[in-house]
Image (cartoon, rainbow, N blue to C red):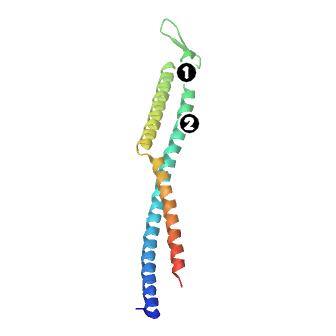
């Protein structure tokens, strides 16, 4: 028994409306997920950049401070425990200065090592890459859904 063409057209139209509604709902959810991923990517990128910049700045500072530490061979000691320095500074002040620079350099180096270890432990760079990959996939999915919605238009 042949169906009425009007009934068949009505069923097709109903199915198209169902698909449109489903695709629009899916499109909305995908856009929300992509925007959340964009925000998360931005946050991770900022954290990663801050970590890398602080390590670079502190490493440069550490190198600079190490260059300021006078070479121990610059100090000649006389056997009667009288110190003669080439720079003419008070030996106690010079030792405090060297001690301060040594401590500061050690603190900076320790900080840099700790930050690098934490970044690697939490795999921040890998997460940035993974989130970026997910964003690209969602963008592709959104494009496909929009294309399908265009095709469904009469």
- Calculate the distance from the C-alpha at mark 1 to the C-alpha at mark 2: 27 Å
Disc marking residue 60:
2
Residue at the spot 47% in from the left edge and 92% down from the top edge: 5
Q: Nearer the viewer, residue 45 or 111?
A: 45
Disc marking residue 22:
none
- Above or below, 109 relative to 147: above
Residue at the spot 46% in from the left edge and 39% down from the top edge: 116
Q: Nearer the N terminus, badge 1 or badge 2?
A: 2
Residue at the spot 43% in from the left edge and 72% down from the top edge: 26
Q: Position of residue 98 (x, y in %)?
A: 50, 25
Q: Nearer the viewer, residue 61 or 19?
A: 19
Q: Position of residue 135 (x, y in %)?
A: 49, 60
Q: Quadrant of the N terminus?
A: bottom left
Looking at the image, the residue that sits furthest to the top is: 79
Q: Which residue is mark 1?
A: 89
Q: Position of residue 2 (x, y in %)?
A: 43, 91
Horizontal side of 85 relative to 33 (left or right) equals right
Q: Secondary structure at mark 2?
A: helix
Q: Is residue 42 visible?
A: no
Horizontal side of 13 relative to 70 (left or right) equals left
Q: Nearer the viewer, residue 35 or 143?
A: 143
- Above or below, 45 relative to 68: below
Q: Is residue 72 visible?
A: yes
Q: Secondary structure at mark 1?
A: loop
């Amino acid at each position: 028994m042949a169906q009425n063409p009007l009934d068949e057209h009505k069923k097709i139209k109903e199915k198209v409306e169902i698909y449109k509604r489903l695709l629009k709902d899916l499109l909305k959810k995908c856009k929300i997920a992509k925007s959340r991923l964009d925000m998360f990517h931005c946050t991770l990128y900022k954290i990663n950049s801050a970590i890398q910049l602080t390590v670079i700045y502190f490493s440069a500072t550490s190198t600079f401070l190490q260059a300021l530490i006078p070479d121990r061979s610059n100090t000649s000691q006389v056997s009667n425990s009288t110190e003669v320095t080439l720079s003419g500074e008070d030996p106690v002040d010079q030792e405090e200065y060297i001690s301060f620079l040594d401590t500061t350099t050690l603190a900076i180096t320790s900080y840099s090592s700790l930050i690098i270890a934490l970044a690697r432990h939490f795999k921040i760079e890998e997460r940035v890459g993974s989130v970026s990959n997910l964003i690209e996939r969602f963008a592709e999915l959104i494009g496909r859904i929009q294309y399908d919605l265009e095709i469904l238009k009469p």
